[in-house]
Image: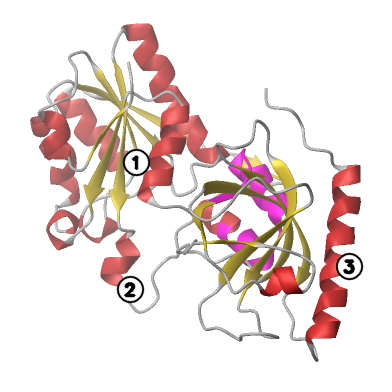
């Protein structure tokens, strides 16, 4: 059964297939290893019972509503989140608009309302610290009490630790903004990636002897500005190609206010303007800095390329499973 994506609970209610509904609920930003414990429980239970495994998530983040001056910067877009959730085997993803109307639902009314809209709801799966309802007054104890009255089961997953600290989206965001890619990837359970289309550039890299691909990419959460080792893939390649990437404001030649992602492949480049690429971020080589001139920049780019070549010699790309 292919995964279906819905933009509201009401839309899903009218289209979900028949069978007991096993529903994982949460923001699930990054779809990291801690989230897997919740979502995979729903998937396995649905398969055993012949039911439907679904995820209820939200957009935008509640902080956009309650703290618009300092909202949480999200790891991924709804589209990328849907793709990661699909890979976990869910049958449906429901992305509910988190607006003032939805936020005003009282905690003790949340589950009865959900049951009215989704009468096939059999079991809910959440993290043990999940909160819900107006003012975030609902906790796991209220959820279980409400569910029992409605004949719904509740499965709460304990937080998973790594190095004695809970795996969390907040922790991953911190690693990304610090350039700690290996740490972030260990918690995600996959390699952090960017996706974008190659756009025309100013050809500066080519004049410096290091041609680059300019990739249109505007993440909500910006990783640390600097130089990275990455793998680049697209429809023109059978396997990802090793490369060195620069993400930042280009202070030596442009000092832009909008960060740009530039990729220099360590192999012959098959890509051109208009190609859609996926860039997997592997390691951080150095922070962005301003150089005295073009010659100093050229020398540093050569050093960055050599550092990336050395890194890949020690960490050769693995063939796809």
As displayed, is residue 236 above or below residue 3?
below
The reply to whether residue 30 is in sight is yes
Q: Coloring scheme of the render?
A: secondary structure
User: Which numbered mark, 3 or 2, is in the foreground of this view?
Assistant: 3
Q: Residue at x 65, y 51 (%)?
A: 184
Using a 10 Å C-alpha cutoff, classify the residue at mark 1 as few (fewer than 14 neighbours), some (14 to 19) or many (20 or more): some
- Along the line of sight, which residue is nearer the eye, 96 or 1? 1
Earlier along the polypeptide chain: callout 1 or callout 2?
2
Q: Position of residue 36 (x, y in %)?
A: 50, 33
Return the residue at label 3. Answer: 303
In which quadrant will I find the N terminus?
top left
- Asked whether 260 falls inside the magenta stretch, the response is no
Q: Earlier in the sequence, mark 3 or mark 1?
A: 1
- Residue 140, labelled with which disc? 1
Residue at 13% in and 30% down: 13
Disc with the residue nearer the chain's start (3 vs 2): 2
Q: CA distance from mark 3 to mark 1?
A: 53 Å
Q: Secondary structure at mark 3?
A: helix
Query: Secondary structure of the magenta portion, mostly?
Result: helix
> Residue beneath label 2, please?
67
Alpha carbon separation for disc pair 3 and 2: 43 Å
Q: Residue at x 55, y 83 (%)?
A: 256
Check if residue 192 falls in the magenta segment.
yes
Q: Helix or strand or loop: what does disc 2 sit on? A: loop
287 displayed left or right of 98: right
- Camera-side residue of 2 and 132: 2
Q: What residue range appears in magenta?
A: 173-194
Task: State the image coordinates of residue 270 (x, y, percent, origin top left).
Answer: 65, 45
């Amino acid at each position: 059964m292919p995964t279906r994506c819905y933009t509201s609970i009401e839309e899903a209610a009218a289209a979900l297939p028949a069978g007991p509904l096993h529903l994982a609920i949460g923001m699930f930003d990054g779809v990291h290893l801690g989230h897997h414990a919740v979502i995979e429980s729903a998937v396995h239970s649905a398969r055993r019972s012949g039911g439907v495994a679904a995820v209820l998530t939200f957009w935008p983040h509640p902080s956009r509503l309650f703290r618009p001056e300092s909202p949480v910067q999200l790891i991924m877009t709804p589209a990328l989140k849907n793709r990661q959730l699909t890979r976990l085997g869910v049958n449906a993803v429901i992305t509910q608009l988190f607006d003032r109307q939805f936020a005003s639902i009282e905690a003790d009314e949340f589950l009865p309302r959900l049951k009215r809209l989704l009468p096939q709801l059999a079991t809910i799966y959440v993290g043990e610290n999940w909160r819900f309802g107006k003012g975030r007054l609902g906790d796991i104890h209220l959820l279980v009490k409400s569910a029992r009255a409605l004949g719904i089961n509740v499965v709460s997953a304990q937080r998973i630790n790594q190095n004695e600290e809970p795996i969390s989206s907040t922790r991953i965001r911190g690693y990304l903004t610090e350039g700690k890619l290996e740490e972030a990837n260990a918690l995600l359970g996959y390699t952090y990636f960017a996706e974008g289309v190659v756009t025309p550039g100013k050809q500066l890299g080519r004049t410096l002897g290091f041609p680059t691909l300019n990739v249109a990419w505007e993440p909500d959460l910006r990783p640390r500005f600097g130089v990275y080792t990455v793998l680049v893939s697209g429809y023109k390649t059978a396997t990802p190609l090793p490369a060195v990437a620069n993400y930042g404001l280009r202070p030596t030649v442009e000092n832009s206010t909008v960060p740009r992602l530039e990729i220099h492949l360590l192999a012959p480049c098959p890509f051109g303007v208009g190609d859609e690429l996926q860039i997997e971020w592997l390691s951080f080589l150095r922070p962005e800095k301003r150089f005295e001139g073009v010659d100093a920049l050229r020398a540093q780019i050569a050093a960055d390329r050599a550092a990336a070549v050395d890194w890949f010699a020690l960490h050769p790309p693995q063939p796809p499973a």
